[in-house]
Image: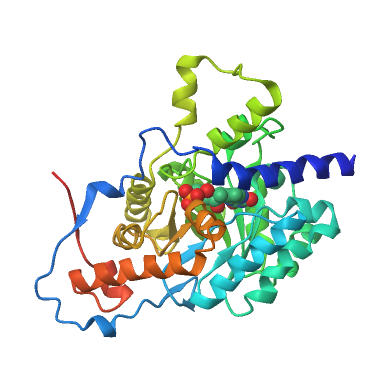
Amino acid sequence: MIERTDNITIERKHSHVEICLHQDVGFNGKTTGFERYEFVHNALPEISFAQIDLSTTFLGRKIGAPFMISSMTGGYSAASRLNQRLAEAAEHFRIPLGVGSMRQALENASYRESFSIVRKYAPSVQIFANIGAPEVARGLSREEISTMLDMLEADGLIVHLNPAQELFQPEGNTDFRHVLEQLGNITATIPVPVIAKEVGCGISKSAAHKLLQAGVKVIDVAGAGGISWQKVEEVRYTRQFGQESRFSLEALDELLNWGIPTAQCLAAMNELKNEFPEHAGFEVVASGGISSGIDIAKSLVLGARIAASAGQILKALHAENLEKTIETWLNDLRAVMFLSGAATIEQLRNKHLFIKP
Ligand SMILES: Cc1cc2nc3c(=O)[nH]c(=O)nc-3n(C[C@H](O)[C@H](O)[C@H](O)COP(=O)(O)O)c2cc1C
C-alpha cells in the first residue's frame, strides 16, 4: 500500500515540475493586477544608486532582499538536485526558502534526504517546512510535526491551502473539514511560526481573518495571475482519463481561471489590518505571478513584507539561469528605488503608487 501511494506521489511531483515547465498553465486573461499600478516618478531622488540597500527583515530576521523562493518540491530522487540548487541560490542572496509538501517524507524516511539537503546548502537562511491542508485536517501528531521541523532545522511551518488544486487533482483529497480547528492545535504547540499560503487562488479577507484567529503569523496570499493549479491538475486528469471533463464546458473555463488576483489579495490584507488592529502585526507575503523586481517593489508598497515566486524561479533553474534571474529582479528593484527616491526598503514601503487611468 505504501509502495503504491509512493508511486502515485512520485508521479505527481515529477509531473508537476514537467507540466509547469512545458505546458501552458497560466490563467486565461486573468492577471495579478500589478500592471494597473505605477510608481510616482521622483525627479529629485537625492540618493546615490550605489548606496541602495535591499536588506530588510522577515519574521524578525535580517534577510538580504525582500524576496523568497516559494515552496516547490522534494520527495523523489531528482528533487534533491532541484532543492540543492534552490538552496544554493537562497544562501547566495541571503533570502528565505520554502520546501515542497513534506507528506512523502513523513510516509517514507528514504525521501527525507531530498528535503534535508536544503539545510546543508543553505545553512544560514530561514527555511520553511511545508504540509497541505488535507494532512492538517486529519490531525498531524506532534511527532510528525517535529520530524518535519527537525529535518530542515526549520524556522517555520508553511501550511498550504489548496482546495481548487485538490478538486482538480485526479487523486485529490477534498475533505477540508476541521482544517481551522487542527491548525489552531498546531499553532498552540509548535515552537516556530506558522505561515498559511494558497497555491495560486489567493486568500480573501475573511479567510485570512480566520487564519489569524487560529494563530497563524504570516499570510502568503499566493493569488491568481501566475500558475493555475487547476490547469496543472486538469492536464494530469486528461492524461489519465481522456479528454472528457467532469465539468460542463461552460463552467470549465471559469473554474480553471478561479481565484483572487494577487494585488487584490494585498488590498484585502490592508483592509483586514485596518479593521482588526489586534491583528495588525501579521506579515504578508505577496506571491502568485511575481515575474520581475517591479512586481516585488509594487508588492511592498501594497503592504507585503516580502514577495515570493515559484513558477518563474523553476523556469530560470531549468534554463540554468537561476542566480542571474534573481539578480536581474533585484536590479529591477534597485531601479524602482532609485527612480522613486528610496535608499532603503523601509523608505520604499512609504512610497506611493497611482492607478493607471
Ligand atoms: C513545481 C511546483 C511544485 C509546487 N509544490 C508546492 C508544494 O508542495 N507546496 C506548496 O505550498 N506550494 C507548491 N507550489 C506552489 C507555489 O509555491 C506557489 O504558491 C504557486 O505556484 C503560485 O506562485 P507562482 O505563480 O510564483 O508560481 C508548487 C509550485 C511549483 C511550480
Q: In this view, does 52 lie to the left or right of 186?
A: left
In the foreground, 90 or 198: 90
User: Which residue is rendered at x = 40% and y = 32% of the image?
Assistant: 28
Nearer to us in this view, 307 or 281: 307
Image location (x, y in percent) of residue 323: 49, 69
For residue 277, above or below residue 245: below
Residue plotted at (20% across, 61% down): 352
Q: Residue at x 52, y 14 (%)?
A: 248
Q: Is residue 310 left or right of residue 278?
A: right
Q: Can residue 197 be seen in this view?
A: no
In the rendered structure, the answer to whether residue 316 lies left or right of residue 296 reads: right
Res. 29 visible in picture:
yes
Could you tell me which residue is drawn at 64 percent across and 79 percent down?
Answer: 123
- Where does the image place residue 94, in percent across and percent down from the top left? 51, 76
Q: Where is residue 335 in the image (x, y as percent from the top left)?
A: 26, 70
Residue 5 placement: quadrant: top right
Screen quadrant of the N terminus: top right
Which image quadrant for residue 155? bottom right
Instruction: Reply above or below: 217 against 119.
Output: above
